[in-house]
Image (tube, helix red, strand yellow):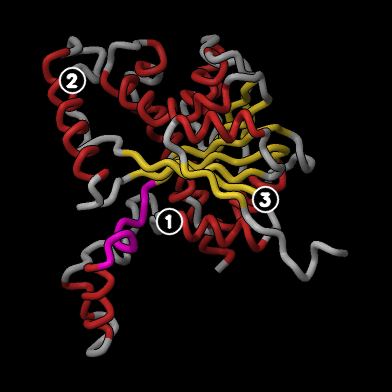
Amino acid sequence: MIENSLKSYDAHERHIQDFFQESEERHFALRNKDCVSYKISLRYLDVMIPLLKEKNKWLTIGDHTGFEAKYLTEHNQDATASDISDVFLRDAFEQKLIGKYKKINVEHIDLAEDSYDYLICKEAFHHFPRAYLGLYEMIRVAKKGVVLIEPIDAWFKMPLLLFIKNICDCFHPLLINKIWKNRFSWETVGNYVFKITDREVEKIAMGMGLSCIAFKEMNTRLKPIPAKWGDSQKTPFDEKLYRKLNHKLMVWDFVCKLRIIPFNTLCAIIFKEKPPQTLVNDLRKNRYRVIELPPNPYLSGQ
């Protein structure tokens, strides 16, 4: 099992290094704020706005180009970028696109407890071969909390699909695979794809005796963005097509708010210390569900 985990990390590191050698547009999205990738990435990262009103010390995890660190720095935060491979980060640092970086394996973060106020992991958690081991390490290193922005395990947000699965399981445990095509899904790099739910995050926080968690669901992109939309140095930004994308996302958001289908992305904030009431109020104003967790009755008196 450990050997497979090491193979997965090695495969990811090689993949990033190979992509770095092949890439002609290494930091296009960091530099060009008119490209589609940049604008869509803001849709992810702007969910952190309530946490950015005071200056904090941040560590980004799985930030292979340094985009998240650059975003945080532009919002007056003290940010350090990190990834399993530092080839993109080193290049971004040399080009003065980011200020600090580290090469980090999330399962073994060589930092003391409470080293950073916040850690953010955007769409990297689902690449980890032992995802929850990585999450526990992130919580250990954080002083205030960890921000996860990851795909939702939508199957468990739809009761009808769960009902169908339960019926199928009565006949054969693999029968549901005819409907649930990506039940066992791997990426070409070699990792199993972990998706999260708010309930899983809640259980982790409860087991560790943490006091507060917050969730916000959102939709990010409908499909990979084609270069003709202006997602390349070789093609001009197409404002008309981008407006079309935004319109589709608005419609999708409306349908999701009606609970007809689930959102596709979850932002989960796992607070390691109880947040101030002003921050809780800000989160709720920004449509977060803030859950204050009860203490363990068998340990709280000790």
Q: Viewed as shown, does residue 150 lie left or right of 56? A: left
- Residue placed at 70% from the left, 58% from the top? 209
Q: CA distance from mark 2 to mark 3?
A: 41 Å
Q: Secondary structure at mark 2?
A: helix
- Residue placed at 25% from the left, 51% from the top? 259
**As drawn, which residue projects farthest toward the bottom?**
171
Q: Secondary structure at mark 3?
A: loop
> Mark 2 highlights which residue?
242
Q: CA distance from mark 1 to mark 2?
A: 30 Å
Q: Secondary structure at mark 1?
A: loop
State which mark lies toward you, 2 or 3: 3
User: What range is drawn magenta here?
Assistant: 151-159
Nearest the camera: 59 or 25? 59
Is the residue 202 above or below the residue 37 in the image? below
Whether residues under marks 1 and 2 lie with C-beta atoms below 8 angstroms apart, the answer is no
> Mark 1 highlights which residue?
197
Residue 14 seen in render: no
Q: Residues within 10 Å of mark 2 (few under 14, many from 20)?
A: some
> Mark 3 highlights which residue?
211
